[in-house]
Image (cartoon, helix red, strand yellow):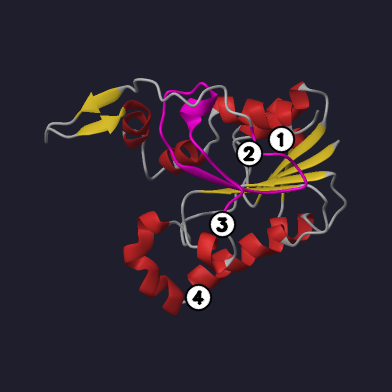
Amino acid sequence: MKILVACEESQAVTKEFRTLGHEAYSCDIIGCSGGNPEWHIKKDVIEVIKEKWDMIIAFPPCTHLAVSGARWFPEKIADGRQKQGIDLFMAIANADCEKIVIENPVGIMSTKWKKPSQIIQPWMFGDLAKKTTCLWIKGMPNLVPDTLDEPELEYHNMPSGKRMEMWMYKIRCLDTKSGARAKAASKTFPGIAKAMAEQWTI
C-alpha cells in the first residue's frame, strides 16, 4: 500500500508501516527527526494529500483545537488561528482517499464536525501512559485494544505534593527552546503506532 502519514516528523507510525513492507511516507513542513529522510516529504500537507494515496493517517496540529487550551479560544477565534486549524483538519477529512484516519486529542472538532469514531488510551496498547486520543476513521475498522483493564501507571511526586505521570514528567524536563518538548509530546506511542500498522493493513 502507498500510505501518507501526514503531519508527522517523528516517523513513529511511518516506520511501523515500512516494517511491514508498505510504501509509507511521513509528511511535515519541517524536516524529520526519525532518521529516515528518504521516507519524508517536506511539504505543506495540503498539497501532498492531492496525490493518489491508498491510505492517509493524519496528526494535524491540535494547538488551536484541543479543549486543554480553551482559555485562549477567544483570542484564536479573533485572529483566525482556530479557523486555520479547522480548515486543515477538514481538508484532510475531505481528501480524495477511501481510507482516512485523523488523530487529535479531545477538542472542538467533535462539535464543529462530528464525534470521533473511537477514543483510545496508550495503556490499551501496552504503553504505561494515559493520554485521551480521538480517532476519526473512514474506510477501516476501529482499533482493537490489547486490554481494557487500566494498569497501575507510574507517577513522579512533585514538590507541591501533586503527582504527574512519569511519561509527561520526562517530557516536561526537556528543553522548550529547542522544540524537543513539543516533538516528544506529539510523538505517537509505540503500541498505538504498531497497532495501526498491523490492524489497518490486513
The answer to which of 162 and 7 lies nearer the viewer is 162
Q: Where is mark 3, residue-wise? A: 115
The answer to which of marks 4 and 2 sits earlier in the sequence is 2
**Tag 3 or tag 1, which sits nearer the N-term?**
1
- The numbered mark, 2 or 3, whose residue comes first in the sequence reads 2
What amino acid is labelled 4 in the image? Gly
Determine contact: label 4, label 1, CB under 8 Å. no
Instruction: Please give the range of residues in magenta.
Output: 116-143
Residue 167 on the magenta segment: no
Relative to 46, residue 40 above or below = above
Pointer 2 or 1: first along the chain: 2
Under tag 4, what secondary structure?
Answer: loop
Q: Nearer the viewer, mark 2 or mark 3?
A: 3
Check the image and name the residue furthest to the left: 160
Q: Secondary structure beneath disc 1?
A: helix
Report if the CB atoms under discs 4 and 3 are less than 8 Å apart. no
Residue at the spot of label 1: 37
Numbered mark located on residue 32 in the image? 2
Residue 80 disc label: 4
Residue 12 x %, y % = 62, 31
Give the structural element (helix, strand or loop) at label 2: loop
Q: Name the residue rendered at 37%, 74% in the picture.
A: 74
* Within-10-Å neighbours for mark 2: few <14, some 14–19, many 20+: many
Marks 4/1: CA distance?
32 Å
Which of discs 4 and 3 lies nearer the camera? The answer is 3
Q: For the residue carrying disc 1, how many other residues have a C-alpha within 10 Å: few (<14), some (14-19), or many (20+)?
A: some
Amino acid carrying label 1: it is: Pro
| On-image quarter of the C terminus | top right
Place of residue 161 in the rendered image (x, y in percent of width and height, measured from the top left): 12, 32
**Residue 60 visible:** yes
> Which element carries disc 3, helix, strand or loop?
loop
